[in-house]
Amino acid sequence: MNEDRTFLGNGWSFPPALDKDGTPTRMSAYEENIHQNLWTLLSTSPGERVHRYDYGCPVRRYVFEIMDISTQTLLRDEIERAVVMFEPRVDLNRVDFEVDEAAGILRITLDYTIRRTNRRTNMVYPFYLHEGTDLVGVIG
């Protein structure tokens, strides 16, 4: 079945990269473009983008927080707000968390439906709670 999915859009792949044939940058399209945009949204803190100061999701704000139900509720609200504001091609069905304290990982699962195709899918975003805490010295 050859379906036209061009209405889902395309854009630069994430992270931006050059193709081997010299094409200026790799592109992503359709569902993969939506997935990469959601990944970029969760990876970007508000204020990082010069021309879109409000773009992003403050996931990093929760790095040193105890991941109890209150913190998870606050983080869920932040993620839902960001997806509603910056990824209009999807309806967010659910945000779930899996906390692995021993490994210092918070797995954020986004369950979403692509509006134009009514296709339900999900992605898991691994957030490392103790990232950068194994530093042994200061260079200087």
Image: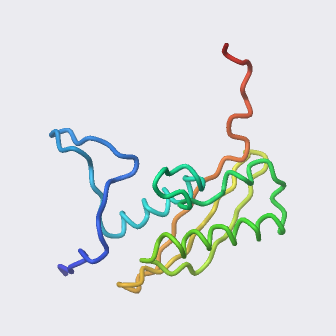
Q: Residue furthest top?
A: 140
Instruction: Pick the quarter of the image with the C terminus.
Output: top right
Query: Horizontal and vertical percent for residue 24?
Result: 21, 44
In the displayed structure, 22 sits above or below 7; it is above
* Residue at 71% over, 18% down: 138
* Residue at 27% over, 77% down: 7
Colour treatment of the image: rainbow
Q: Residue furthest left?
A: 21
- Going by the image, does 23 lie left or right of 140? left
* Residue at 61% over, 73% down: 81
Picture quadrant of residue 59? bottom right
In the displayed structure, 47 sits above or below 74; it is above
Q: How many marks?
A: 0
Q: Nearer the viewer, residue 109 or 71?
A: 71
* Residue at 68% over, 40% down: 131
Instruction: Pick the quarter of the image with the N terminus.
Output: bottom left
Q: Nearer the viewer, residue 1 or 52?
A: 52
In the displayed structure, 9 sits above or below 126; it is below
Query: Horizontal and vertical percent for residue 36?
Result: 42, 59
Query: Horizontal and vertical percent for residue 14?
Result: 39, 51
Q: Nearer the viewer, residue 41 or 93?
A: 41
Query: Horizontal and vertical percent for residue 120?
Result: 46, 80
Picture quadrant of residue 68? bottom right
